Image: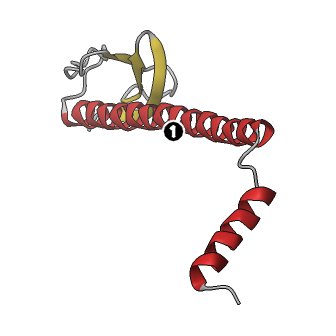
Amino acid sequence: MRGPASVVAWAAGFTASREQGIGLAESLAAIAVMAATAVALVTALGAGSVSVRHADELATARGLATSQMEHIKSLLYDVAGAYEKLDAPTGYAIVLAVDSGIFADTDIQQVTVAIRKGGEDVLSLQGFKVNR
């Protein structure tokens, strides 16, 4: 009968003779799977950061347009439609368009506030100014 040490040595020799380690094809397959996973992760992070940047621009533009519209509503009615603009954050521009000829009533103006960033329109908001 064999002792515990000889059984362990026999089992170690038995498994070592049947398994010869990881082959080249298996290693390459594992590397390919890890590379595909890394590419998918980097792509997802890139798309996520673009979405966050776009959402931040929209939120800034919406707040700026709303503030400008409320500011115009708080001012006295100007027949010429020459309302002052608020200061825009760096990179943003406020474009005002006032149209008095839409309605037969000359005491109503349609006000359009457009927010631009880098020369491109980000958001446009329309409202009315009434002479009260």
Residue 122 placement, left or right of 79: right
Tell me residue 126's x, y (percent). 45, 32
Q: Quadrant of residue 2?
A: bottom right
Tell me residue 20's x, y (percent). 75, 50
Q: Residue at x 80, y 59 (%)?
A: 18
Residue 120 placement, left or right of 98: right
Q: Residue furthest bottom?
A: 1
Tell me residue 32's x, y (percent). 71, 36
Q: Residue at x 71, y 40 (%)?
A: 27
Q: Which residue is mark 1?
A: 48
Q: Residue at x 26, y 30 (%)?
A: 72
Viewer-closest of 76 and 61: 61
Say whether residue 130 is visible.
no
Say whether residue 33 is visible.
yes
Tell me residue 120's x, y (percent). 48, 14
The correct choice, above or below, for 9 with respect to 74 in the image is below
Viewer-closest of 96 and 39: 39
The quarter in which the C terminus is drawn is: top left
Q: Residue at x 64, y 70 (%)?
A: 9
Residue 87 placement, left or right of 50: left
Q: Quadrant of residue 1?
A: bottom right
The correct choice, above or below, for 46 with respect to 5 in the image is above
Judged from the image, the secondary structure of the residue bearing numbered disc 1 is helix
Viewer-closest of 48 and 63: 48
Viewer-closest of 83 and 108: 83
The correct choice, above or below, for 22 with respect to 16 in the image is above
